[in-house]
Image (cartoon, grey):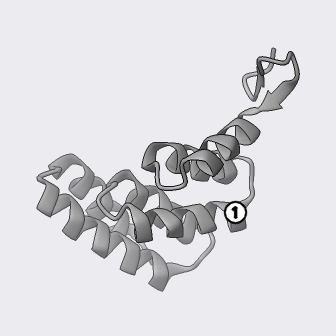
């Protein structure tokens, strides 16, 4: 079975994205599921859907620190540099408040590398 496919209880094969979409539909405020879905969309090249899910995370789960780095990376990759700077700056602030120095350092490095 492909790494992007899983078998449901009915024997049907579902993509990882479909499974994550089901999780998010059941619990829309669950940060872990929505973050996983955002990453899956990003990895599959669906930047618009990834953007939507990262934005939802920032609204409903602003304390979920990994969002800021990955969303900043997506924005930078799409040459949305000013947006990436804003997201990363907010992420650095959130990571500092949470005492997450590692995440703070990663976001600072990305922010410093933006052209």
Relative to residue 50, is residue 66 depicted above or below? above
Q: 113 or 9: nearer the eye?
A: 9
Residue drawn at point x = 17 percent, y = 50 percent? 100
Mark 1 — residue?
49
Q: Nearer the viewer, residue 42 or 73?
A: 42
Which residue: 63% across, 60% down? 50
> Position of 72 compared to 66: left or right?
right
Task: Answer above or below: position of 73 versus 79.
Answer: above
Between residue 64 and residue 47, name the one nearer to us: 64
Q: Quadrant of the C terminus?
A: bottom left
Image quadrant assignment for residue 92: bottom left
Judge from the rendering whether residue 14 lies leftward or rightward of residue 101; answer left or right.
right
Quarter of the figure with the N terminus = top right
Name the spot of residue 66 as percent of width and height, x first.
Answer: 37, 51
Tell me which residue sits at (72%, 41%) in the image: 17
Q: Secondary structure at mark 1?
A: helix
Q: Residue at x 34, y 65 (%)?
A: 62
In the image, residue 7 above or below residue 88: above
Q: Residue furthest right?
A: 12
Q: Quadrant of residue 96?
A: bottom left
- Between 61 and 103, the one lying in front of the other is 61
């Amino acid at each position: 079975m492909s790494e992007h496919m899983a078998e449901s209880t009915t024997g049907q094969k579902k993509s990882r994205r479909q499974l994550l979409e089901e999780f998010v539909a059941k619990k829309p405020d669950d940060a872990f599921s929505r973050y996983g879905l955002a990453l899956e969309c990003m990895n599959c090249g669906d930047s618009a859907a990834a953007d939507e899910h990262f934005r939802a995370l920032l609204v409903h789960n602003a304390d979920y620190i990994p969002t800021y780095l990955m969303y900043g990376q997506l924005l930078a990759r799409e040459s949305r540099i000013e947006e990436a700077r804003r997201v990363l700056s907010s992420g650095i602030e959130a990571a500092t408040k949470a005492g997450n120095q590692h995440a703070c350092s990663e976001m600072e490095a990305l922010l410093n590398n933006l052209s």
